[in-house]
Amino acid sequence: MCVPLPALMHPMVVPVALWVWLLHSAACLASGHGPAGKKEISIDGDLVIGGLFPVHEKGVGSEDCGKINEHRGIQRLEAMLFALDEINKDPSILPGVMLGAHILDTCSKDTYALEQSLDFVRASLTRVDGSEHICPDAMSLAPYACPSSSIQVANLLRLFQIPQISYASTSAKLSDKSRYDYFARTVPPDFYQAKAMSEILRFFNWTYVSTVASEGDYGETGIEAFEQEARMRNICIATSEKVGRSMNKKTYDGVVRALLQKPNARVVVLFTRSEDARELLAAAHRANVSFMWVASDGWGALESVVAGREAVAEGAITIELAAYPIKEFAAYFRNLNPYNNSRNPWFREFWEHKFKCSFHTQDCSRYSLKTGKFEPESKITFVVNAVYAMAHSLHNMHQALCPNATKLCDSMKPVNGKRFYKDFMLNVNFDGEFRGGEESVVRFDRYGDGIGRYNIFNYHHMDGRYRYQKVGYWAEGLILNTNLIPWAETSVPVSQCSDPCKKNEIKSMQPGDICCWICIPCQPYEYLLDEFTCMDCGLGYWPNETLNGCFELPQEYIRWKDVWAIGPVTISCLGFISTLFVFGVFIKNNDTPIVKASGRELCYILLTGVLMCYSMTFIFIAKPSTEVCTLRRLGLGTSFAVCYSALLTKTNRIARIFSGVKEGVQRPRFISPTSQVVICMALISCQLIIVVIWLLVETPGTGKETEPDKRYVVTLKCNNRDSNMLISLTYNVLLIILCTVYAFKTRKCPENFNEAKFIGFTMYTTCIIWLAFLPIFYTTTMCISVSLSGTVVLGCLFTPKLHIILFQPQKNVASHRVGTTRFSVAAAGSSQSHGECSRAGGEGWGPAPHFLLLGGRHQHGILEQSWDGSRTWLKTGE
């Protein structure tokens, strides 16, 4: 329902009471002036409805009444008279029964309102105007605006079982039927309004606010209801202030300063009377500060509250009871003047006040209410509904008790107030007059309260002027159109104790305060379980972009296209090709002297080991799997073992031969090719046994590995520990050490046995490589280490032989007689510590032409060895 924005007056300061009582005679109340010249309205009727209205404002000092109250007094009073006129003209409501009225002024003062209420009670028991006529018992309907007045009058009337209906009293206390069991109202209690306001705060996530309440039942009870609703929605109150009528400007300035002490609470909730809200805005204007105001219907859509203070009020969100305009009343009121409205004894005073004229000194007849804009007071609808609610209740009672009568019957003389309230008043249900529809239905709940319906306004600057814009509606739930709210900062203001935490932060709540927190960042590998908890994703997982869950990280491993893989693979491919080439050359020249003299069997085993070294690069770069991990464990140590077992067998054979020569013993054992191969295989088998035991103890497989400072990188690798891998290479280290020792011992052997010199160089280089790469064991470095180890063996041992075979073939031929090389070896205890190699003439001798005999003279004879290494002996007795 769209409601225009009239000039609304504060709904909570006006006491209004409507009493209805039965009169046997219309003479009971017939004059416009009561005792002692007191002004009142008395209209004859079969049923007379009494009313209390704040025709005047509260007086100053000892005066009871102040200046005329244009909106809340005159307009509301005329609304009651208008409703009575319409009901009396309606043949469907109380046909044959006329409604009268008895209306008094409360002067906006609770004690004065109570005094006026006593007049109504006395009227139902004794003489009213000093005549001898006695009026009968009465029942009443009473609408009030000021809660204190409503409560006092309700307490009085219940003593005489006089029912009452209020059109403006919204105090939640009046819903207590154990104390106010004859009270009803066409407006909802304040806790509905408090609920609507708290839902607005929650909608905009304003969780840290300040409050200001007017002193008295309206403000204090209302703000108490709001705070209860706010707690249910985790909204915290930064500071609570109170304002009152007795406060001066300095006191209001102090309230504004108190609000400024909580800078994070940008939203200020007002549950105040209109005049208090006006003074608070004036104080904010003096301090040149502004807040985000959220105000109750005390502010509502009143222009008088914001007049002259528009800038500091801009952006305010206000609540107003959902009412609809009554065009018929607007036409009725605009046609009134002092000459056609003599039944209202205060109308001439209102006319003088409004037009600033005087009937005593100048002519006021030239003024008219038809000129200018008419702004209906906000509670006009509820005044009319209250009168109609009483009329419908009386109509229903008349039909029930006097079904065949057109006048009042004896069953309604006197009226049982308790029965009337419970059986008829609380059960009344009708569409609001002058407008139909669901939003205008008038009924009471079991507490006698009206339906909670509110319009929500935003005060802002538009089209060159400030105005109230309806932006929402509340009726058991909030409906807001935020597109109609032009925020001053282009975004919704923030009103929170602490700044919102960033995307990757959680709230650490402060003790005793649910709205204040410290933001603590989560670790990069943690996601937000809720706004208070970081949760570890676990190894191998990483938070998603929204940090509300985790995803599995891709597993990193060396791929063939990686830069780290291209180098080792290239080296291995070249080495693999080179090794195959050497293999081919040796096989092609298998029967040549240099191949035979090199020990063909061990050379082929050695070349196989070199091929295995190069092939390990491909196994180490392949994606880890159970099979690949098994081959890594098996292949790494075995490839080294093949190479170094062959080299150890070679160097050991040479060392044993020359050791035997020096000691003068006979030919050493196990130096034949077959024996050499068996020894070599035995050494390799030791490595295989170690690997098999390792495989059984630690089953091969894959696992994920992350570094503590790089958990976002998950490496897929074999599940064996690097330390275990190094331990498995211990046997190879032993082979290397032994090879190096033997190579060093045989480094001076001549001619064909100069191979020991190359073996020594190979082992020295190998030791350097292993010392360099073992401490930084890693996939790529191990690939390079293995390839370099194979390259050293290939380059240092086979390149010299390959050079002779390919570029010096003349040296690779057999000869029946060649010059012998004689050399002497110092005997034990000799002063000569090293062999001396010299060329000497002499006749060579030897077996068949299949052998090229190289001889060395020894003090005990001649040392002879075939090129193929199959025969070595010492001949004595030259």
Image (cartoon, rainbow, N blue to C red):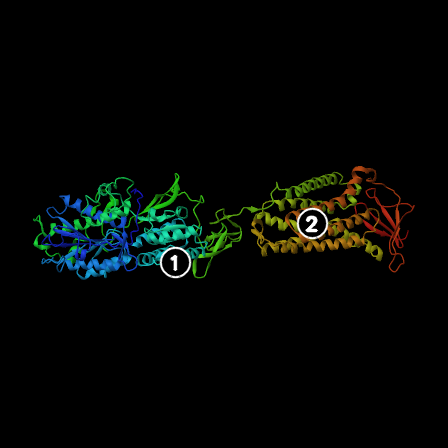
Q: Percent position (x, y) of residue 636?
A: 65, 49
> Which is nearer the eye, 443 or 250?
250
Q: Position of residue 755 (x, y in %)?
A: 79, 47
Q: Amino acid at mark 1?
A: Glu
Q: Earlier in the sequence, mark 2 or mark 1?
A: 1
Toward the front, the furthest residue is 361
- The foreground one among 345 and 221 is 345
Q: Is residue 404 above or below residue 173?
A: above
The amino acid at mark 2 is Val
Residue 700 shows in this picture? no
Classify mark 2: residues with Cα within 10 Å, few (<14), some (14-19) or many (20+).
Answer: many
Instruction: Examine the rendered structure and indicate whether residue 247 appears above or below residue 82.
Output: below
Q: Secondary structure at mark 2?
A: helix
Percent across and percent down for residue 468 are 35, 44
**Which residue is at a point 91% across and 47% down the rendered structure image?**
840
Residue 805 located left or right of residue 417: right
Q: Which mark is residue 873?
A: none
Q: How many marks?
A: 2
Mark 1 nearby-residue class (10 Å; few <14, some 14–19, many ≥20): some
Query: Along the line of sight, which residue is nearer the eye, 387 or 742?
Result: 387
Where the N terminus falls, by quadrant?
Answer: top left
Give the number of the mark in front: 2 or 1: 1
Task: Tell me the distance, in whole angstroms, between the alpha carbons under discs 2 and 1.
Answer: 92 Å
Whether residue 215 sits left or right of residue 384 in the image: it is: right
State the image coordinates of residue 821 (x, y, percent, origin top left).
88, 47
- Is the C-beta separation of discs 2 and 1 under 8 Å? no
Helix, strand or loop at mark 1: strand
Which residue lies under the disc numbered 1?
241
Q: Which mark is residue 642?
A: 2
Q: Is residue 159 left or right of residue 588?
A: left
Residue 340 makes an appearance in the image: yes
